[in-house]
Image (cartoon, helix red, strand yellow):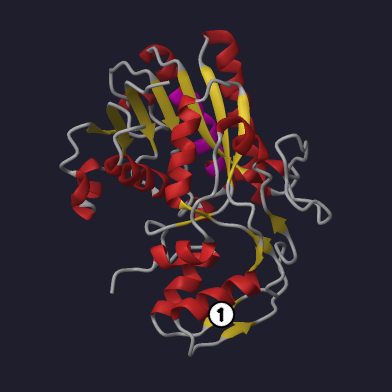
């Protein structure tokens, strides 16, 4: 399914930069026109001047929490990826919940008015709640749920509500919703100075410092390179199977301890990995998707190995 005109929220974040770089390098799957809603177009383009020359991209100043700032345009597809993954954890839980749920509803209302047919929501693997230890990879059919009595689950529960809103709008207004349940990622556009463990490890190793693990290193994660992420999201915009949720991520599981050791070996072999052993609510947890649905129905695959992804994520010398 070609993409004549994509309206994109979150187009200046990690997902946005990854997709813009991917679409710049290819003409096969690139939308013919992309409209990006962002709080500060000029600020973004000053930081990333390489995107100023893309004649197929238009930036609009606006905020998903304010319906009066949306542009008066029509579009064929909508990709809603505007969630503050970097500063979001520092927001009060109520504010974070409202930003996700109310923001999603505003984007859905815009989609109805703009005549969009396809609506892709970037959700999170957190909607499943804590992955059972005996479950190697978590499938879309697992009906777990984050504990609603814990304020720190506001993000995951809000994403669940946002998914449901998409389905409701699909039934009432004819929009074709698709859900991307996103797990963990790595790439050249991943911030190295926020709460992402792999980014922190790369930052410290490139500085010639030892890698510090605050916990016990037993938690298990997996990381998909931003190139593969971009291919997957583009394919989800075009899928012929709407009203479906797809896990988006890597099935290559690795413990935080082994991840830190891998980064050390690739980037700063003379350094060390220090495990402080502090106990927290993520100690010993798994967060690894089962991506069989995306692989078997959409032909998607993981093409960049974790060592290569780490090398690609290294900051310029």
Using the rendered view, name the quadrant where residue 148 is placed: top right
Confirm whether residue 41 shows in the render: yes
Residue occupying the point 40% across, 78% down: 206
Quarter of the figure with the C terminus:
bottom left
Q: Is 77 rendered above or below residue 46?
A: above
Asked whether residue 101 is drawn in magenta, I would say: yes
Q: Is 292 rendered above or below residue 199?
A: above
- Counting other residues with Cα less than 10 Å from the Cα at mark 1, is it few (<14), some (14-19), or many (20 or more)? some
Quarter of the figure with the N terminus:
top left
* Most distant residue in the right direction: 134
- Mark 1 sits on what residue? 212
Asked whether residue 213 is drawn in magenta, I would say: no
Residue occupying the point 29% across, 69% down: 316
Most prominent secondary structure in the magenta stretch?
helix
Residues rendered magenta in the picture: 96-107
Residue 122 spot, x, y in % from top left? 52, 37
Residue 296 spot, x, y in % from top left? 63, 34
């Amino acid at each position: 399914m070609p993409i004549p005109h994509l309206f994109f929220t979150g187009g200046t974040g990690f997902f946005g930069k990854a997709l813009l770089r991917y679409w710049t390098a290819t003409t096969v799957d690139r939308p013919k026109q992309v409209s990006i809603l962002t709080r500060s177009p000029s600020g973004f383009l000053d930081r990333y001047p390489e995107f100023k020359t893309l004649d197929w991209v238009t930036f609009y100043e606006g905020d998903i929490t304010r319906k009066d700032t949306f542009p008066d345009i029509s579009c064929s597809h909508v990709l809603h990826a505007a969630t503050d993954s970097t500063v979001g954890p520092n927001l009060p839980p109520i504010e974070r919940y409202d930003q996700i749920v109310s923001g999603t509803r505003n984007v859905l209302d815009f989609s109805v008015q703009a005549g969009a047919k396809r609506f892709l929501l970037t959700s999170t693997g957190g909607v499943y709640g804590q992955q059972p230890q005996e479950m190697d990879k978590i499938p879309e059919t697992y009906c777990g749920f984050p504990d609603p009595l814990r304020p720190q689950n506001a993000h995951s529960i809000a994403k669940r509500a946002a998914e449901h809103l998409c389905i409701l709008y699909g039934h009432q207004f004819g929009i074709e919703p698709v859900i991307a349940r996103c797990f963990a990622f790595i790439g050249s556009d991943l911030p190295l100075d926020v709460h992402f463990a792999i980014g922190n490890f790369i930052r410290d190793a490139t500085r010639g410092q030892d890698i510090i693990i605050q916990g016990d290193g037993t938690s298990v994660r997996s990381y998909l390179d931003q190139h593969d992420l971009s291919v997957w999201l583009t394919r989800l915009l075009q899928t012929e199977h709407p009203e479906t949720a797809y896990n988006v991520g890597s099935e290559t599981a690795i413990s935080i301890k082994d991840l830190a050791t891998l980064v050390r070996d690739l980037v700063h072999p003379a350094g060390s990995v220090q495990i402080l052993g502090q106990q927290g609510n993520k100690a010993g947890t798994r967060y690894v998707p089962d991506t069989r649905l995306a692989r078997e129905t959409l032909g998607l695959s993981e093409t960049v190995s974790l060592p290569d992804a780490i090398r690609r994520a290294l900051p310029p010398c």
